[in-house]
Amino acid sequence: LYLFELYLVAVYLTEFYLLSVYLTEFYLLSVYLTEFYLLSVYLTEFYLLAVYLTEFYLLSVYLTEFYLLSVYLTEFYLLSVYLTEFYLLAVYLTEFYLVAV
């Protein structure tokens, strides 16, 4: 009878040990899943950072293009001013020639 009771105690201790092993494995699984979740969060943040940097780069490109457009429009305006001055000079020289003749 004592041997049978010892056997039952050994069985219960083995079951308790196995239960602790399963709980430890479950805990480790939850730790790994948490680490995987955090890794996916970090990768998502890295992706969003790349997106924001790309948007910032594109914004700087658009601002540069806008600046160059304003430079070109200014040059076109100055060209039209110079051509107008040249035209007026030609008119004045023509009037001077006509008066001289």
Image (spheres, rainbow, N blue to C red):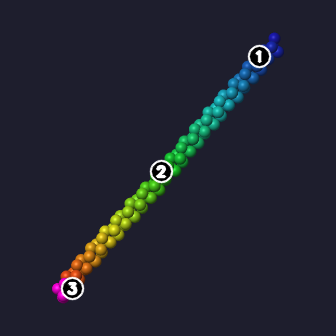
Q: Classify residue 39 as left or right of residue 54.
A: right
Q: Nearer the viewer, residue 8 or 89?
A: 89
Q: Residue at x 21, y 85 (%)?
A: 97
Q: Residue at x 53, y 44 (%)?
A: 44
Q: Label 3 sits on what residue type?
A: Tyr
| Nearer the camera: disc 1 or disc 3 | 3
Q: Label 1 belongs to which residue?
A: 8
Verify whether residue 24 appears in magenta. Answer: no
Q: Nearer the viewer, residue 32 or 59?
A: 59
* SS at badge 3: helix
Disc 3: CA contacts within 10 A as few (<14), some (14-19) or many (>=20): few
Q: Label 2 belongs to which residue?
A: 52
In the rendered view, tell whether residue 19 sits above or below residue 68. Answer: above
Region of the chain picked out in magenta, as a range: 96-101
Q: CA separation, marks 3 and 2?
A: 66 Å
Residue 4: quarter of image: top right
Disc 1: CA contacts within 10 A as few (<14), some (14-19) or many (>=20): few
Q: Main secondary structure of the magenta part?
A: helix
Q: Label 2 sits on what residue type?
A: Tyr
Please state, as top left, top right, bottom left or bottom right, where the N terminus lies in the image: top right
| Nearer the camera: disc 1 or disc 2 | 2
